[in-house]
Amino acid sequence: MTVTPSDLAKLALDRHRLPWNWSLQFAALVLFCLTLLFHSPLFLTASIILFAIGFLRLTMDEPPDNRWFRFVKAGIEWEKDWIAAPWNWAKWIKFIFIFTITIVFLWALWTREAATLGLIMGFAVLIRVVVENIDNGIEP
């Protein structure tokens, strides 16, 4: 049986969308942020290993219904919706905005720029408060 690169990409995406695998890859992302902050080759190695393990077939029980796995399921659904959405102007603008913020955040981690990190985290908290207020029926 011949395996094509598109078959491998589909298999990787299917495994990435499993809750345990998504959790491992999210942990690898957090560990990569710590890698940039501490300039640690050990953290880099661990984050690469965790990210790679996230593509393996993990024979684990069904995830429990707790806050973390509800977050994981919401993240997986958001990711599916993002991939399925057409590339229109709104999606391009969101992509460019998130890409720019990500680059600034990674630069701030690498240079240990505390003021920039604080501003980014402060704006993230403000955005979360606004979203929660809107969900609770409070208009900003």
Image: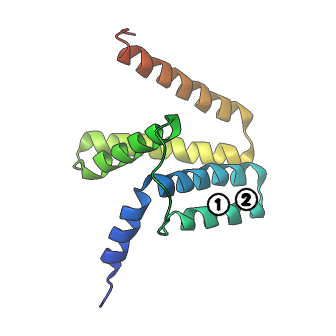
In the rendered view, does 38 fall on the left or right side of 95?
right
Residue wearing tag 1: 47
Residue contact at pointers 1 and 2, CB within 8 angstroms: yes
Give the class, few, some or many, for how many residues have Cα within 10 Å of label 2's Cα (few <14, many ≥20). some
Residue 134 image-quadrant placement: top left
Residue drawn 35% across the image and 43% down it: 78
Instruction: Measuring from the top left, give residue 108's x and y in whole percent.
Output: 67, 43
Q: Amino acid at mark 2?
A: Phe
Instruction: Measuring from the top left, give residue 79's x and y in whole percent.
Output: 36, 48
Callout 2: SS? helix
Residue drawn 61% across the image and 30% down it: 121
- Note whether 122 is above or below 112 in the view shown: above
User: Between residues 89 and 15, which one lies in front from this camera angle?
Assistant: 15
Instruction: Measuring from the top left, give residue 131's x and y in whole percent.
Output: 41, 22
Q: Quadrant of the N terminus?
A: bottom left
- Note whether 1 is above or below 17 in the view shown: below
Q: Quadrant of the C terminus?
A: top left
Residue wearing tag 2: 43
- Note whether 131 is above or below 121 in the view shown: above
Callout 1: SS? helix
